[in-house]
Each structure stands twice: as C-alpha cells, then as structure tokens.
Image (cartoon, rainbow, N blue to C red):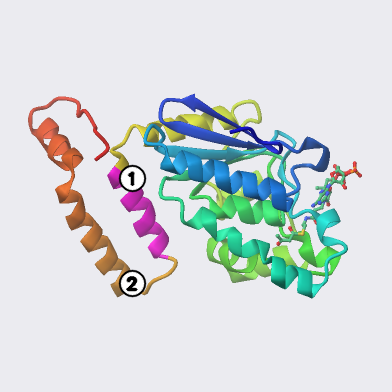
Amino acid sequence: MTYEYILTETPAPGVGLVRLNRPQALNALSGPLMREVFDALEAFDRDPEVRCLVLTGSDKAFAAGADIKQMEAAGQVEMLSGDDFTDWSRLSRLRKPLIAAVSGWALGGGCELAMLCDMIVASETAKFGQPEITIGIMPGAGGTQRLTRAVGKALAMEIMLANRHLTAQEALHYGLVNRVAPVDSYLTEAIQLAEKIAGMPGVAAQMIKAAVNKAFELSLSEGLDYEKQSFYLLFGTEDKAEGMQAFVAKRAPQWKHR
Ligand code: CAA
C-alpha cells in the first residue's frame, strides 16, 4: 500500500509505526491524511505479526490541528454531512495498544489525536493545546471530553478558553503523558516501549487495553464486571497455560499470542 501523507514501517519486532508526513503544513490533519492514518493503523491492527502500534509526526510538529484551510470555506451543512469526526472513532476501535510519540506542536485536532492513543511519549519540545477558540470554534474531536478527564476541569477550561499551552513537563505533571524524553530519543523510547508491549502475550494485552478504556465509559460496578469476565476468558488461552507452566518450571515463557 502506498500513501501520500503518511509513512509506515515496522521498526522493531511486533511494532507497527505510522508517521504523519505533511511537513509543509505542520501535519495539519486534512481529511485525506486522516483516512490514510485510519487505513494504515487498521492494517497493522489486522496484521498478526504486529502487536503494538506507534503514531508519530515530525520533531517539529506532531500535528498542528485540523486543516484550517480545508475548513475555511465550509459551512455547517458541509460539516454535518461530511461528519469527518465520527470517522475518528475508528481509532477507538483499534484492538492493539497504540502509543503516540509526540514532539513539537500537538494543537487542536493534533492534541485530540494524541489523546485518542492509549499512551503518550513526549519529547521535551512537545506543546499541547486546544486553540480552536482563537479561530472562532471549539474542539470537535474529543478535546472537551478527553482533556477534561485527563487533566481535570479547571485546567482543561483554561487550556480551551484562554489558549493555554501545556509544556511536556506540565503534561507529565498532570498525567496527560507517560514520559518525557530528549527530542533525539523520544521516538526510540516510544518504539522500545512498544517493543516491550509487543513481547507480552497479545490476547491479554488487547483485553487489558479494552478493560482500561471501559473505565472511561462504564460505572465502577459495570467496569469491574467487564474486567472479571475478561479475566476468566483469558483462562481459555494457550498463553495462560504457557505463562503459568513457565512460572512453575522457572523458565521463560514462549508466547503464541493465542
Ligand atoms: N491547518 C492548515 N494549515 C496549517 C495549520 C492548520 N491547522 N497549522 C499550520 N499550518 C500551515 C501554515 O498555514 C503554514 O503554511 P504556509 O507556509 O503555506 O503559510 C505552515 O503550516 C507553517 O505554519 P506557520 O508558518 O504558522 O508556522 P509557525 O511556526 O509560525 O506557527 C503554529 C506554528 C503556532 C502551530 C501555527 O501554525 C498555528 O497556530 N497553527 C494553527 C493551530 C490551530 O489553530 N489548530 C487548531 C485547528 S482547528 C481544530 O483542530 C479543530 C478540532 O478540534 C479538530
């Protein structure tokens, strides 16, 4: 598959990497670019050799938001009938863990895209923000909901109402990102984290991801019930038998990812 706005590779065993590649527009998230992102990540999600996904941009910009030039002429009819943001939920349906490796600008839709990922590894230069109000609109791809859940109401309000940017260190402090690394090593760190996850039993990894994400959708009792059923289901996997046998025999497990 050849793409125009992204690059794909498998930089480590079990790891599928998608890189946004529209540098002249700071990776502004046009409709065609996003469709390539969805297609490429879904292809890795279906690939049995891949067990963890990484999404990155350039050192200068993860993504500077939805494409303002594409939206400039649009009215509400075009926006409603095009309904591009419903498509973004395709990322929520990926079964394999997805890590965002973020450097430079992660603004508007760029910040929302990073927050749609399961984990974020940031470079020291990463800057997160939701500046939509400065062009007369508001976040439309999850910012009001996911950022508020991530950093709390008061700070989320300031970020969205006063166009406050969060530095990488602030994002780490507030729990928006997993870790911060120098700009020349954040991607390597993200790939190493992905490789470590890819080396875990794949079915368990997918079920953990699904259960953690349910914590944002369900009541505590429903979430606990979901977790318990998933836990019991894993007892039907070959990797459960192998993992426990290997522990008892004091040897390393050989995962089959089934
Ligand atoms: N859409 C389209 N083009 C964009 C863009 C965007 N979101 N962000 C940057 N670009 C383009 C610029 O127009 C410029 O193109 P030209 O060279 O053809 O003029 C190029 O990328 C480089 O940008 P700048 O010259 O502006 O670079 P800078 O270093 O001076 O500034 C920046 C960087 C602060 C990120 C600035 O580009 C900026 O403010 N961008 C817009 C950020 C924004 O408002 N994002 C929210 C978009 S709306 C949204 O995302 C809705 C949603 O919820 C999904």
Q: How far apart are labels 2 and 1 at the CA level?
A: 21 Å
Visible residue check, residue 241: yes
User: Label 2 sits on what residue type?
Assistant: Leu
Name the residue nearer the viewer: 44 or 230: 44
Q: Is residue 112 magenta?
A: no
The residue indicated by pointer 1 is 205
Q: Nearer the viewer, mark 2 or mark 1?
A: 1
- Secondary structure under tag 1 reads helix
Assess disc 2: are there few (<14), some (14-19) or many (≥20) residues with their C-alpha within 10 Å of its C-alpha. Answer: few
Q: Which mark is residue 56?
A: none
Compared with 76, 129 (above or below) is above
Q: Tag 2, which secondary structure?
A: helix
Q: Position of residue 89 (x, y in %)?
A: 54, 60
Does the magenta segment cover residue 210?
Answer: yes
**Residue matched to label 2:** 220
Circle 1 crowding by C-alpha within 10 Å: few under 14, some 14–19, many from 20: many
Q: Residue at x 58, y 33 (%)?
A: 1
Check the image and report above or below for 80 versus 98.
below
> Which amino acid lies under the numbered mark 1 shown in the image of this protein?
Ala
Magenta stretch bounds? 203-215
Report the magenta stretch's main SS. Answer: helix
Q: Earlier in the sequence, mark 2 or mark 1?
A: 1
Q: Is residue 178 visible?
A: no
Q: Say above or below: 175 vs 214.
A: above
